[in-house]
Image (cartoon, rainbow, N blue to C red):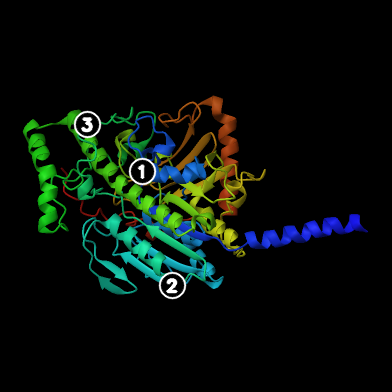
Amino acid sequence: MIRRLLPLATLLVATVAHAAERKQPNIVLIFADDHAYQAISAYGDPRKLIETPNIDRIGREGMRFDRCLVTNSICGPCRAVVLTGAYSHVNGFVNNSNSRFDGSQITFPKLLKTAGYQTAMIGKWHLESDPTGFDFWQILYGQGVYYNPPMNRLGERTPTNGYVTDIIADASLDWLKKRDKTKPFMLMTQHKAPHREWSPALRHLDHDKDRKYPEPATLMDDYAGRGAAEKGQDMTIRNTFTQLDAKLTTPPSLNAEQRAEWEKYYGPRNAKFQEANLTGDDLVRWRYQRYMHDYLGCVRAVDEAVGRVLKFLDDEGLAENTIVIYTSDQGFYLGEHGWFDKRWIFEESIRTPLLVRWPGNTKPGSATRALVSNVDFAETFLDIAGVPIPDRMQGRSLVPVLRGQTPADWRKSFYYQYFEYPTPHRVAPHYGVVTDRYKLIHFTGGTGTTDYWELFDLQKDPSELKSVIDDPAYRDTRATLEKELTRLRTELKVPAEIPAMWHANPPGAGKKKQQKKS
Ligand code: CA
């Protein structure tokens, strides 16, 4: 009898302990815009562009994801995917140009709110319609501006004074301090930085003391070995850099005092640049250096903002029961292939940084190569909160991965699709399948002869410089990937015909006026 009771007692203790563990954890999603993993020191870029001690801390005390892929690599669509756990063709927000988020659809913040969470969204929203599912929201108008950005606070225009990243961090901490402490919380703190035109905080203008940054090997890429889409795009540092990108004009939102400080830094350096009268590759090299200075300057303020949130959680004794996620809406080019921007299925664009700290669940300092995605985030947050995941969601909870127990049937392939064309960067629409080693891509029209297929072997060609689509050695690989692509398109209910409006401008509608080039 005693022998039979003992296991029961043990079970009861375990159940009570489990119930205590089930106390709904708080969730803090720190979301940057266009933050390349190459600009996070935890990801070990060989150029060693920057140290990001606070962002790295999340990885050091949690898990670093090395293969977090986005479904459609541009700002608005990625945000819609995160909220809905569904691909663009399901949630309806397909491009940045004419999409408007349908706020009546199911999102994870709404479900968490129903489950008793306090929810807040602070920072860059960029989904056209007002946020839904939040107890509190304070967002930038559209893309927002870097200096003194007016914000929309629950529908009311609110002026601000200062640098956008600091203002978003201040508002986030302010909400955390004033929250109802009897409830768990979910905070989305979403930065504008380091999005184009990548303007740093004034205190960071001289952050690198005129350091000369190592160039990527492909800065002068001529796109040989690839097709018309790569050759026909319009997102190069060489051809598409504006005066504002280069900081040869002053951002208009600065006030007089800020403007003086800004000009004190850039003025003499710009005068030296004008004197040098650079052309060709020399001009590309100069712009790359200016780009790195500005972009990485923005990252410094984001890292500081992350540090402030982590410190708040420490000081308030919240760190143990709070899951902290650092990620970006997508990846970004830092001069690789001569590019800035994103959009492509290629590595620097499709891969987004993801670092997660979840005390008692993630092993400190762990890393994974599991193929995960922003389409998994909503499912993960619901799972963590003990909320059932709706059938409409198309991703999968990362909870087992975070616990170091990636299921044997975890996805081995991933579907990607990009629509926006031709503005703003003439990246031809395409879709494809990505595995641990390969990418099979179908460009579906846009720049002349752009209905063609490509295949890349990332193991032999990590920089994706030469398509092997016609190489007989890859015939079987291609056939297998084609089959997998068809399977994924069926499973994800991808429409066979893409509506013309899913492109920024339907083909034939003309090209939007380009910004003045530097
Ligand atoms: Ca973005």
Query: Can residue 293 be spotted in the picture?
Result: yes
Q: For the N terminus, which image quadrant?
A: bottom right
- Residue where numbered disc 1 is placed: 332
SS under mark 3: helix
**Residue drawn at 24 percent across, 48 percent down:** 200
Query: Can residue 509 be spotted in the picture?
Result: no
SS under mark 1: loop
In the picture, the disc for residue 135 is 2
In the rendered image of this protein, does residue 15 appear above or below residue 357?
below
Three-letter code, disc 3? Arg
Spot the residue most to the right: 1
In the picture, the disc for residue 285 is 3
Image position, residue 329 (x, y; %) = 40, 52
Give the side of residue 512 with respect to residue 124, left or right: left
Alpha carbons under labels 2 and 3: distance apart? 47 Å
C-beta proximity under 8 Å, tags 3 and 1: no
Q: Earlier in the sequence, mark 2 or mark 1?
A: 2
**Residue drawn at 14 percent across, 54 percent down:** 258
**Residue drawn at 44 percent across, 60 percent down:** 80
Image position, residue 322 (x, y; %) = 51, 57
Three-letter code, disc 1? Phe
Image position, residue 259 (x, y; %) = 12, 53
Alpha carbons under labels 3 and 1: distance apart? 18 Å
In the rendered image of this protein, does residue 439 appear above or below residue 305?
above
Mark 3 residue's CB less than 8 Å from ligand 1? no
Image position, residue 373 (x, y; %) = 51, 49
Give the side of residue 428 with respect to residue 167, left or right: right
Give the side of residue 118 with respect to residue 96, left or right: right
Mark 1 residue's CB less than 8 Å from ligand 1? yes
**Residue drawn at 56 percent across, 30 percent down:** 475
